[in-house]
Amino acid sequence: MEMRHLGTNGPHVPAVGLGCSAMSGTYGPADEAEAVATVRAAIDAGLTLLDTADFYGMGHNEWLIRQALRAGDREKITLSVKFGQLRGPDGSFGGSDGRPAAVKNFLTYSLQRLGTDHLDIYRPARLDPDVPIEETVGAIAELVEAGYVGHIGLSEVGAETIRRAHAVHPIADVQLEYSLFSRSIEDGILDTCRELGIGITAYGVLSHGLLSGSYRPSTDGTDPRSHLPRFNGENVEANLALVDNLRKVADARGVTVAQLAIAWVIAQGRERNDIVALIGARRPQRVTEALPAAELDLTGEDLAAIEEAVPASAVAGDRYAAPQMQQLDSER
């Protein structure tokens, strides 16, 4: 497995990591036994970066990872945890909390659920508009000093916020949605991270399944992604036409659409060794299917063909509805 550095002095991790949110209901019910098997399959395959959050399934995901880890696994893995998203008993989201006292409270519960005495990377999931990022990062820095956290990360923040946070304590990586369908980080954020020696952990590399090569629009209205603009009406038809374009390139290389899409993200960080792709999975088969992407060396000709097949300007619809987009510091 090709390895990457998250930050100048950050952890050494594989180029592909495992995003665990789908194991706790993000896209509908998941079988716990299969989820446990998926985590173990990922670790055995060398995908030792596990990304979770305390609000995935309201703590369920952390508990699940604890059940999945076998003797000796904790020493092999890099645990990356997000915090700060408030949830209601009905599963609704209630904003972000980045207050220093809340940071320490969130960490305490995560350590308990995960059954560990430290986290390798800890990050606020979203910027709290009511708390200066310096205060939130300062609180995590105290936890680093105390040995409870190894490195500090950020998520979905813009260039100015990244600079302010990095001035308080070195930031290892920024977690951002990055795929052939989501390339806004190329407009300043990526350059800022590279200037400061900060890694990128890319999530949504298959654009919530649009780039999986197997997605078909739901006809019964039960798809939990139906509220996303890219999955609506004419948008989804236009986007699936782009996927069909990409399929021709994938077929020529003898790989799947998903493998090519993942490989494209990995390729964006190959020269600088600074981008990690998270794959979301809840069944071991998905891990197995993604593995070839890490070994796929795309040529300049391949990359040009991919760009022609999926021009960034041709993607239809925003990542989220307007109210959610306004909450993303990274999109301002």
Image (cartoon, helix red, strand yellow):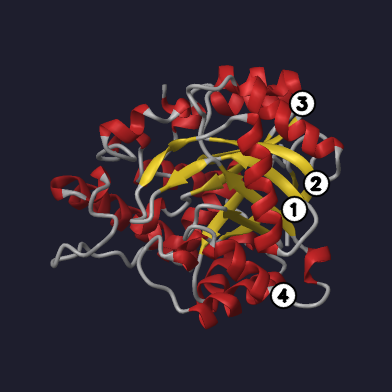
Alpha carbon separation for disc pair 4 and 1: 14 Å
Residue 104 percent location from the top left of the image: 69, 40
Alpha carbon separation for disc pair 4 and 2: 26 Å
Circle nearer the N terminus (1, 2): 1
SS state under label 1:
strand
Q: Residue at x 54, y 75 (%)?
A: 35
Instruction: Name the residue type under label 2.
Output: Tyr
Q: Is there a contact, CB below 8 Å, between mark 1 and mark 3?
A: no
**Residue with the mark numbered 4:** 44
Instruction: Name the residue type under label 1.
Output: Val
Q: Is residue 169 visible?
A: yes
Q: Is there a contact, CB below 8 Å, between mark 4 and mark 1?
A: no
Residue 13: assigned label: 1
Residue 169: assigned label: 3
Residue density around tag 4, few if under 14, some if 14–19, many if 20 or more, within 10 Å: few
Instruction: Name the residue type under label 3.
Output: His
Residue 148: assigned label: 2
